[in-house]
Amino acid sequence: MEYFLNEQQKTIKGLARRIAEERIVPVRAELDEKEEFPWEITKELANADMFRVFIPQEYEGLGGGCLDLCLVVEELSRACGGVAISYAADALGCLPMIHHGSEEQKSRYLPAVASGKRLTAFALTESSAGSDASNIRTTATRERGHYVLNGTKQFVTNGGAAEIYTVIAMTDPTRGSRGASALIVEKDTPGFSFGKKEKKMGIRASATRELVFRDCRVPEANLIGKEGQGFIISMRTVDRSRPGVAAQAVGIAQGALEAAVEYARQRVQFGHPVSSLQAVQHMLASMAIELEAARAMVYAVARTIDSGAKNFTEVAGMAKVFASDMAMRVTTDALQIFGGVGYMRDYPIEKMMRDAKITQIYEGTNQVLRNAIALELMKRKAKRP
Amino acid sequence: MNLVVCLKQVPENPKIEVDPQTGALIGAKGKLVINPFDMYALEEGIRIREKHGGKVTAITMGPPEAEEALREAIALGIDQVIRLSHPLFEGSDTLATSYILAKAVDKLEQPDIIICGRQTTDGDTGQVAPQLAEWLGLPFVSYVSRIENIGDRCMVVSRMVDEGHQIVEMSLPGVISVVKEINVPRLPSLRGLMQSKKVQIPVWGVPELGLDVTKVGPAGSPTRIARVSFPARTSQGEMLQGSLESQVDQLIERLRAAPE
């Protein structure tokens, strides 16, 4: 399909694909097996200017929008969902700063992020605050020009690998979600350490870790926006990043479909390649139809965001739900076409299925996003009966 | 430090066809790429610049299509590129080609190191680099697999030889040809790719280089191809027969019997 990408977007997509094929495909199985953070590939992505894509031009970036970021994530995910999310989580970690940070914060941190020298991460989730994100317990108490952080953040993508963290903590626990604030915390700040490293089902090349704060003092100047804006900043941030997760799902599914087509053409049973069986053909066709529909939707939503739309919560959620449900179905069917060998870890297809699963869960479960979409439908009807 | 990398655009598919009548190589078909060995030369040039500062210039002799190769060099991080082209260059052999390259290198600002790939994947002669050094009157070291150290007016390199590695000190300026063991070439960068699309590529021909026209094209090419043939395959493997165990036994016996 013709998606009318501009010159810069075509260049970004082409180079991301080259990196994926030449540098990620050969090592993806090993990274998955060993659960190793892809430092070598991170360096390659940095040298290729990939971390500049989503940073504004004033801070040594390329000034690309949501669509540009989605193109990179999609192409990397086609090879490995774990590597791709490490890249995408870096964008997520600095989105609050890009959209809500002060001039001083941006010029202090963003050039190092653009060059890929310093990775970032976003820390919202806690053990008691998953879908119920407003129920966070980590506190940030103001004390003589500093905020003193106490608490534990959970499931932080790029945790340990990143050097710059956007942490959501309660500056006023009595005010509920209106008492949350967003703070920039640098690695190696006294009182800030890393806890449990998670062992995951999929996206195993990515680092998922706890952040532990014990009387960790952060300068007041690290507050993003104003006190009490932490929750709204978080919600706007994930609205912007959900198309990225959707693009990850599209990329994973694309990789799985291509692998399934190739395998079906070479696997001979009953004297013919299994691709000659209509049962297999129809599965492949349905996979391709759903995949292309999801891609068209993701690009359209990314363009909506890039056009400067004010409220895109609903459409960003739609793209994430649709694409991730699609990826789960497509990778499951792709594995089915591989048959017995697909279940074995010698082939990449079972990893794609494991990687796809998380896209239905993180950055808002598909159930909680359906709630939000339904709520918008009801609100609209209530306004104009 | 001023570095010059010489490169050539070759067909991506290395399958060579020969005109049965004339014995000449049949022109490129399909996609053209930078000669793979020249990729290592480009990478080494960029790495030397990253370590010692300076500027890397890439030159190629070729038709307008060769601009693509030079644009790729820019995308990788080469500072300046020049295409050498003139109607009289057509039909140049390695001697005439190296003469043209030498005149171009002469015109550049005092190069310190000139880097070439060990050979091309189409012509496969490996002659251009040593001939270039000869025209320039500079020292030449072939098959360089590692640059050990670059000093003020000299450089220590390791070169591959049949028996292993040879450490050579050469004076600078000088010419080297590199092998694939020297590095892992990088991929282009986004900023490089975007810049490469905008850059104007200068073309130097006979007048710009002040060439002696009797030394270029067919007039300057003493090479005459008498006949081209493919070598017959002489060495043949031997298939051992019998069960796996007996094949292993046979193999061990052969190895024991073989001369040291």
Image (cartoon, helix red, strand yellow):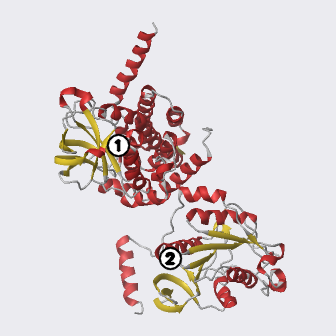
Tell me residue A117's x, y (percent): 39, 58
Kind of residue at disc 2: Ile
Tell me residue B242's x, y (percent): 41, 73
Q: Given the image, what chain letter belongs to the residue carrying mark 2?
A: B
Does A266 appear above or below A66? below
Does A303 appear above or below A108? above
Q: Residue at x 49, y 91 (%)?
A: B168
Quadrant showing the N terminus of chain B: bottom right
Quadrant showing the C terminus of chain B: bottom left
Q: Residue furthest top?
A: A385
Label 2, secondary structure: give it.
Answer: helix
Q: Are marks 1 and 2 on the same chain?
A: no
The reply to whether the C-beta atoms of the residues labelled 1 and 2 are less than 8 Å apart is: no
Nearest the viewer among B189 and B41 is B189
Name the residue carrying label 1: A354
Mark 1: give few (<14), some (14-19) or many (20+) Cα within 10 Å: some
Tell me residue B87's x, y (percent): 83, 72
Q: Quadrant of residue A375?
A: top left
Q: Is residue B205 left or right of residue A91?
A: right
Mark 2: give few (<14), some (14-19) or many (20+) Cα within 10 Å: some
Name the residue carrying label 2: B48
